[in-house]
Amino acid sequence: MIMISSISSKDNHELYMQRCLQLALLGEYYVAPNPMVGAVLVYHDQTGGDIVVGEGWHQRFGQAHAEVNCIVDAEQKKGIAESEEAFYRNSTLYVNLEPCSHYGKTPPCAELIIKKHISHVVVGMLDPNPLVAGKGIEMLRESGVDVEVGVLEKECRFLNRRFICLHEKNRPYVILKWAQTLDGYIDVQRSCDGRYTPLVISNKLTKQMVHKMRAENMAIMVGTNTVLLDNPKLTITRWTGRNPIRVTLDRHHVLDEKYHIFSNQAETIVYEDNTTFSYVLEDLAQKRVHSILVEGGTKLLDHIISTGLYDEIHVEVGNFNLITSQKSKLHGIKAPSLPQVLPYKMTIEGNKLYELIR
């Protein structure tokens, strides 16, 4: 147990909410399409000190929510000579997202809080899911629970920005990612005859970062030409987590089962005919896909940028030029046109990373 005293109430709230966010991240790669949620139970002893008696997080989709795991943790280790009801009445539950009020794959967390007689609940943000959307807070308050909302709300919203986008904008959160050379090329001109190999820009560490991004999102998308030329697997091999749903376009019906994206390693969705990107987002939202990482190629990325239907752009710039002279025999494919100058993030083994979060 952790004992904390002589800290102001406001600072305490933010401290415990920050711990909720840390715990929530432990479920990052396994809870989608659910949000990441962490919970902390704090007991207020007779001397005025605070004791962290329980912690929990939502660990996997379909399994117990953070509040349940937190209370189970407290039950197992509280060891306080006091009745259970008195113990919970003298405790505060911290959680970064409003407790649910509906029956889904698990019972409502708000009902459990009421049943345990927890007197005080501090919530980071309201749940944008229409099935909850304030109903959990209302249920608690109607049962006499003192509820505070909005502690570290900005940080709580950022953590679950993908989940929030799905419910507030009715579309997946869209992340665009590509690598380019110093002189602005994403690849060399290639054809399916294998005359040229793909241009390698990313290094070992930045490739690993790409796989981390794949694990953070529910779907990954590339254009038809990328499938034809690169035959990518679009799976996760350099990080932990579930393989994302693979998404591509095939307006001219040129793709068949010989390509790696049709392997049984992950689900694949192919949109044919004159499917628009906005339709793709609408359809994925219906399937409860809350985020999609778009890795290329230039034509698809440029189109998405022109629509404005994106939330983040990540660009890796290699430390070399593709076209070294006017006499070069290489013909490059220009990288997508950026909507604005991207803020610099970091340098990894010579490659500079830039990131825009809208």
Image: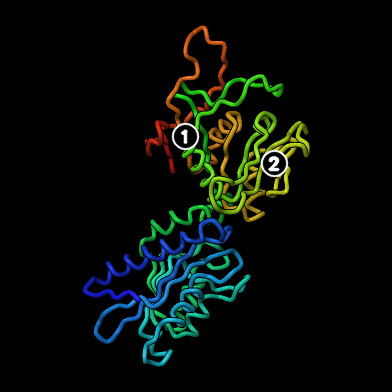
In the rendered structure, which amino acid carries the disc numbered 1? Val
In the rendered structure, which amino acid carries the disc numbered 2? Ile
Of residue 274 and residue 221, the one placed in the foreground of this image is 221
Of residue 204 and residue 144, the one placed in the foreground of this image is 204
C-alpha separation, residue under disc 1 versus residue under disc 2: 24 Å
Q: Residues within 10 Å of mark 1 (few under 14, many from 20)?
A: many
Asked whether, in this view, residue 140 is left or right of residue 300, the answer is: left
Tell me: residue 226, above or below residue 44: above
Q: Position of residue 44 (x, y in %)?
A: 31, 81
Q: Which residue is mark 1?
A: 315
Q: Residue furthest top?
A: 327
Residue placed at 70% from the left, 45% from the top?
A: 269
Does any portion of residue 341 appear in the rendered image? no
Q: Which residue is mark 2?
A: 261
Asked whether, in this view, residue 205 is left or right of residue 8, the answer is: right
Tell me: residue 150, above or below residue 139: above
Q: Earlier in the sequence, mark 1 or mark 2?
A: 2
